[in-house]
Image: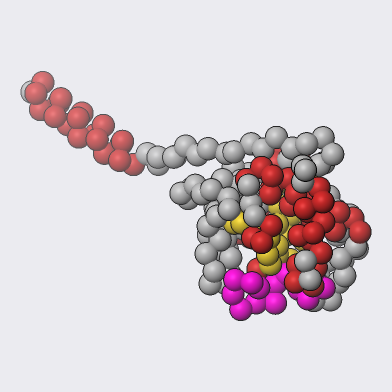
Amino acid sequence: MKSGMLHILILVLIFSACSIPIHKEYEILELSYPDHLQIVRHADWEWKPLAGILPQHEISKITIHHGGVDYPPDKDPVEHIRNLQDWSRKEKKWIDIPYHFMIDPDGVIYEARPINYPGATNTDYDPTGHALICLMGNFENATVNQSQMKAIIELTAYLVERFNVPLYDIKGHKDYTETLCPGKNLYQYLENGTIQARVQERLPK
């Protein structure tokens, strides 16, 4: 009798163990930003833990995106990022926001997807190895203001130095696939070399 009870107990424990969801641990690379680069960190906008994990990657490129949706002047950027995070996870089944950094119309930079995990895209290029920076708004219509440009330059310069990215690998989304992103009014500064040149000016001599 005791032997039979023990057998049943073992089966119950095995079944229970198989029924418990296993939460895989993940690692987040925390970056140390220079004092002049004011960035809203995950904790400051109530970022939610990752919804899953992917193989980690090494950054070798920097790619500029835009949101592709008009951004009203009175829109709350933190609410926008939180909504994007929820949409990315629920609707797209991504682990997080597709971009690593987002920049609002005032040039404020927000941490988004952790930099050590590849981003996501609705197009057919592979973002593995790319640090993705997204300007909120639609730059087919909007123009890049001075605050946004300053934020792009300073963030990109930091990432170039931190990950040893060549200047020729600072590009736009449309350089890798058929898309309008990051919008003609932003892409022009990549196409004519303005962003790359201004980044180079900020690098250590």
Give the image location of residue 157, x and y in percent. 75, 49
At horizontal 14% and vertical 26% (from top left) the residue drawn is 5
Give the image location of residue 127, x and y in percent. 56, 61
Tag count: 0
Give the image location of residue 161, x and y in percent. 69, 44
| Colour scheme of the picture | secondary structure
Q: Is residue 110 visible?
A: no
At horizontal 31% and vertical 36% (from top left) the residue drawn is 17
Q: Quadrant of the N terminus?
A: top left
Residue 195 image-quadrant placement: bottom right
Q: Quadrant of the C terminus?
A: top right
Question: Is residue 11 depicted above or below 164 in this figure?
Answer: above
Does residue 176 belong to the magenta stretch? yes
At horizontal 68% and vertical 49% (from top left) the residue drawn is 160
Highlighted range, magenta: 174-187
Q: 32 left or right of 57? A: right
Residue 204 image-quadrant placement: top right
Camera-nearest residue between 128 and 159: 159
Does residue 107 belong to the magenta stretch? no
Question: Is residue 184 depicted above or below 106 in this figure?
Answer: below
Q: Is residue 173 visible?
A: yes
Query: Farthest top residue?
Result: 2
Give the image location of residue 197, x and y in percent. 79, 59
Residue 163 image-quadrant placement: top right
Q: 128 left or right of 153? A: left
Camera-nearest residue between 161 and 104: 161
Q: 190 left or right of 94? A: right
At horizontal 78% and vertical 36% (from top left) the residue drawn is 34
Camera-nearest residue between 82 and 2: 82
